[in-house]
Amino acid sequence: MTGQVEILLDTNLCNGYGVCVTIMPDVFDTPAGSPVAVLLRDRVEADETDDLDEAIRACPAQALAKRELAS
Amino acid sequence: MVIVGASAAGLSAADGLREGGYDGRIVILGDEQHEPYDRPTLSKKLLVSQGEPQLHALRTPERLEADGVTLLLGHRAVGLDVDRHYVVTENGDAVPWDAVIITTGSRPRTLVTTEAETLPVLRTPADLGLLREAAARYGQVTLIGAGLIGLEIASSLSGHHVEVTVINDLELPLRNILGEPVAEQVRELHRRHGVDLLLGVSVESVSGGPGSYSVQLSDGSTHRTSFVLVGIGVEANDEWLDGSGVALDAGVVVDAAGRASVPGVWAAGDVARLLSHPSLPESTRVEHWTHAIEHGRHVGLNVARGSHADYAAVPYFWTEQYGRRFHGYGRIRPGDTAQLVEGALDEEEYLVLYGSGEKLHAVVSCGCVRSLRGYRKLLERNGTWREALDLTGHTAPIHTTSPPTPADATTNVRKNVEAS
Ligand SMILES: Cc1cc2nc3c(=O)[nH]c(=O)nc-3n(C[C@H](O)[C@H](O)[C@H](O)COP(=O)(O)OP(=O)(O)OC[C@H]3O[C@@H](n4cnc5c(N)ncnc54)[C@H](O)[C@@H]3O)c2cc1C
Ligand code: SF4
């Protein structure tokens, strides 16, 4: 296990509410004018997965998912 | 395990049960016919989307199946037998449980016209359909109540060629939630977008019907409008538990772990009245989306693990008004000092802290989403005002809020109408 996890953002579902940004501002952003969130990086480390899980749960649009990366 | 209520809190409770290692049967009863959906979009995007509104499903059938969750839609619970451990449904079924998690949420308070017609509200897809149709047909909507949902509706519709009036008995709507300086900005935002705000007046009575209503106001005037929608707060869906032995107090009373007064019975989300919580001064129901998710999951974990861990997530809400996104963590209290620490109030982005003495109570931002994490972490560990200021580098207070009234806008409106 590398412990890295890939973040998947479905921009067809995202409503740009920014709930995820309040949880992980170093991963998600909702730039002014953008109707959807953008990923600042597409991986998180093992010690960030609790925050990522919280963001996935909190997203009202169910636009976030993750994929464990095999080592 | 049985979960009653198939929305944010109920589905998250099922997730918590699985995450906590429970591998038995999970049944979720829900009284709506729709697959569980994202409720907050009803007052935002879906209100003004083109064509048939597409509900966002919260779970795919595949995921429910993979999680081993049986979802029984159209099954309204009408009673709870705490001795024999059954949930009784309106179809006459008795669904057995070892533990039951109550997540029946809340419903809007209603107002009735002098002709005994219940006025429309916004909570479900059917309500949404009615409002969209009326907005398109009449091009005119009057909202009674200026809570988060009422004002979201006003902001969504007024940008789409609908003439919107908002009536509220408070001079400054949302002051309890956003704090005075931010609430003032939101009020100005609505004025600037042409919403007609009738503030500081309450509704005495409403008569008429769709196409032609008369609203009698406390200042003696009459407001005429084609369509009225009521958004005067919500009440808990707990009446089906009357007489069950489960303690109720405008909601199912739960301890910090989520346990109701009867062993084996738990509750989460909008329906639960939290007896104690580190961020909340008194027992309260929290009526926000991510609370329903986190509280539901927390209770599911406790049930699965046989544990009694306290729930302590900092209350959080967001709202969208005219494309601006407001986010808040914590709870503003009467007499709190407000301090602007980022941006400027008359600009598009700003962030305000609320607290008193050494205590930080809440943070509300317009647009400054990226800064929230630091303050939220502070609120989580009960950090001080000084530590909050250290995050920003500011010092002088800009604004002091006067104590908000404990009852929100809506109660007076209601009393008046009922009395009439
Ligand atoms: C239009 C609108 C916009 C909103 N926007 C926001 C927002 O922007 N931000 C935010 O934080 N919050 C928002 N909210 C609030 C948020 O939607 C609620 O806090 C959240 O839905 C609560 O989830 P819940 O699962 O506890 O209850 P609910 O979503 O109310 O779900 C309870 C479910 O139980 C069902 N039920 C009730 N009684 C029974 C019974 N006897 N038997 C079986 N089933 C039953 C109900 O039909 C419902 O499906 C909004 C709410 C509305 C209505
Ligand atoms: S929380 Fe979900 S809907 Fe909101 S911006 Fe993030 S991904 Fe998009």
Image (cartoon, coloured by chain):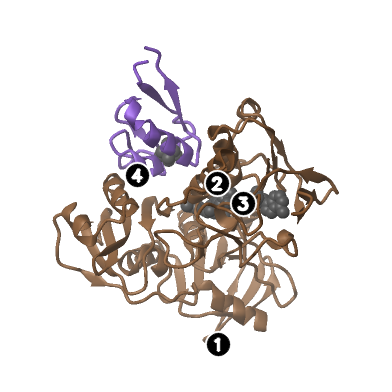
Chain colours: A purple, B brown
Residue type at mark 2? Val
Q: Where residue B220 is drawn, which disc sits there? A: 1
Q: Which of marks 3 and 1 is in front?
A: 3
Q: Where residue B299 is drawn, which disc sits there? A: 2
Q: How crowded is mark 4: few (under 14 residues within 10 Å), some or many (20 or more)?
A: many
Q: Does the residue labelled 1 lie within 8 Å of ligand 1?
A: no
Query: Mark 2 belongs to which subunit?
Result: B
A30 sits left or right of B45 in the view: left
Residue type at mark 1? Gly
Q: Distance between the residues labelled 4 and 2?
A: 23 Å
Query: Mark 4 belongs to which subunit?
Result: A
Residue type at mark 3? Trp
Query: Mark 1 belongs to which subunit?
Result: B
Q: In which quarter of the image is residue B420?
A: bottom right
Mark 3–mark 2 CB contact (< 8 Å): yes
In front of the other: B232 or B259:
B259
Mark 3 or 1, nearer chain start: 1
Q: Name the residue under label 3.
A: B266
Q: In this view, does B181 lie above or below B29?
A: below
Q: Residues within 10 Å of mark 3 (few under 14, many from 20)?
A: many
Q: Name the residue under label 4.
A: A22
In front of the other: B98 or B127:
B98
